[in-house]
Amino acid sequence: MKQRIITAVIGIAIVLPIIFYGGIPFLLLTYLLATVGLYEALRMKKQSIFSIPGLISIVLLWIFLVPTQYNNIIQQFHYSKIEFMMIGILLMLTYTVASKNRFSFEDASYSILSILYVGIGFFYMNETRSADSGLTYLFYALFIIWATDSGAYFIGKAMGKRKLWPEISPNKTVEGFVGGVVCALVVALLFFLISDIPAGMMKLLIAGIVLSIFGQIGDLVESALKRHFDVKDSGNILPGHGGILDRFDSLLFVLPILHFIHLI
């Protein structure tokens, strides 16, 4: 616990000023976090990021992460992001032949899905921060996740009897799941009352429910991934917390949903 607290304090001290400042430093932070996240995802399948398909994956991820406001950089090459992704897929499939199937079709599929899994969340992290009232919405999403996690843990521990999904995460309970949603609703209401967030109360409350549910799904997805590959943590870059994917699993789902439900 002591190690977790020390890591959290150091992390907050480094990251919080960058979040407030925004701009290029925040964009670079998302690139760094996403790159480490991709490294962790590939490593779980024992794929090296320092390989031809690994380098292709990094390049595709970096292209995918280019913010909407900088799309003109992509357009200078006369290709869209989708076309770059298609080129990357063709190169990976070509490498399955060149490697005589040591890098297989399944490996290529996993690499591509890992790019999307990591890339979508971190792309929308920057899109959220750069939007109107983006800082407020980013903290709204973060507090929804923290309230959900805390509520699910404490209420689940105190009242939990029915297992939520024991095959994936044995310690999670239905009562904890519901408790997490209730705590998220409290946070959504508080944001309406004390912040300058422009959305109305009902919209924030409904969004709070949706984001809390998908945040917990994101947690379960990461748990399923780790259980499939029989690893305890996605990485060890954050002592006491695991890896980047361990800490950002909920955020990878919540931030895209924040945009898909048109809250921003």
Image (tube, rainbow, N blue to C red):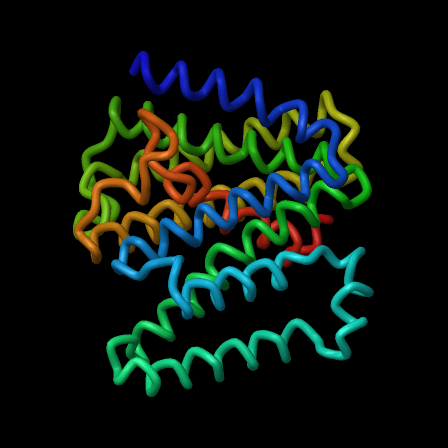
Looking at the image, residue 153 sits to the left or right of residue 10; the answer is left
Is residue 177 depicted above or below 167 in this figure?
A: above
Looking at the image, residue 144 sits to the left or right of residue 157; the answer is right
- The image position of residue 82, as x and y in percent, is 63, 76
As rendered, which of 182 and 32 lies closer to the eye?
A: 32
Is residue 116 something one can see in this rendering?
yes
- The image position of residue 238, as x and y in percent, is 38, 30
- The image position of residue 59, as x and y in percent, is 55, 63
Is residue 82 depicted above or below 162 in this figure?
A: below
Is residue 200 something one can see in this rendering?
no
- The image position of residue 236, as x and y in percent, is 32, 35
Q: Quadrant of the N terminus?
A: top left
As rendered, which of 124 and 185 lies closer to the eye?
A: 124
As drawn, which residue projects farthest toward the top? 2
As rendered, which of 132 and 190 lies closer to the eye?
A: 132
Q: Residue at x 62, y 46 (%)?
A: 125
